[in-house]
Amino acid sequence: MITIKTIGVILRTFSENNKIFIGTRKDVFNTLKKFNVNFIGIPINNTFNNILKSISLCDGIILPGGETYTQNDFLLIKYLYQNNIPTLGICLGMQLMAKCFGSQEQNLSKHYSSRKYVHYITITEDSLLFKILKKPKIKVNSRHHSYIPKTNLKVNALCHNIIEGVEAPNKKFFLGVEWHPESLNDSNSYKLFKYFINIL
């Protein structure tokens, strides 16, 4: 009997047409639909105890992009790290992972684009990301307004001097990327999600 794994996707508040919503981009859920997994949304603005109850139902967690974050984000990331729960961070999710481990967030102008592919990143060869993608360089999208100048996590990808990926080598899977693989729908993105799901 095959056990179907469950992935928790963190939901954050965002505004649209002067209204406040809780959710994430549908690209994340559309990507997960390609795999034999269950997934649930977990609002980050709940009480932390209720968040942990939802986390207990999950085999892995995705920290997606977004515009806002709360103290619960940092409490959750530390909990995921300490309990070795497989975690994939995307854009803001990656930045919050890095910020939990000795970083500061800074503004970066003109690094947001609606184009599918924007720039190349160079991948560190002794990283898990390189093991997954098996490529020293790939082209990615770019939808972030800020960047991480430093972190105590291992940097696994760069675009010039901008950190594009981080990971914790001592964990089962604790990896974040600055770009949005869920929106690219290419072979590199598929490999990343497949590896994350297979390791659950």
Image: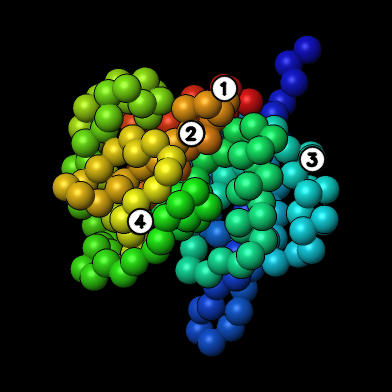
Out of 118 and 156, give the one closest to the viewer: 156
Q: How far across and how far down the image is residue 147, in percent?
A: 33, 59
Q: Is residue 61 visible?
A: yes
Q: How far across and how far down the image is residue 185, in percent?
A: 37, 40
Which residue appears at 52% of the width and 40% of the height?
88
Q: CA distance from mark 3 to mark 1?
A: 19 Å
Which disc, if any, is residue 168? 2
Of callouts 4 and 1, the N-terminal one: 4
Residue 60's image quarter?
Answer: top right
Out of 64 and 160, give the one closest to the viewer: 160
Of callouts 2 and 1, the N-terminal one: 2
Q: CA distance from mark 3 to mark 4?
A: 30 Å
Residue 87's image quarter?
Answer: top right
Residue position for label 4? 148
Which disc, if any, is residue 198? 1
Which disc, if any, is residue 56? 3
Residue 49's image quarter?
Answer: bottom right
Q: Is residue 177 visible?
A: no
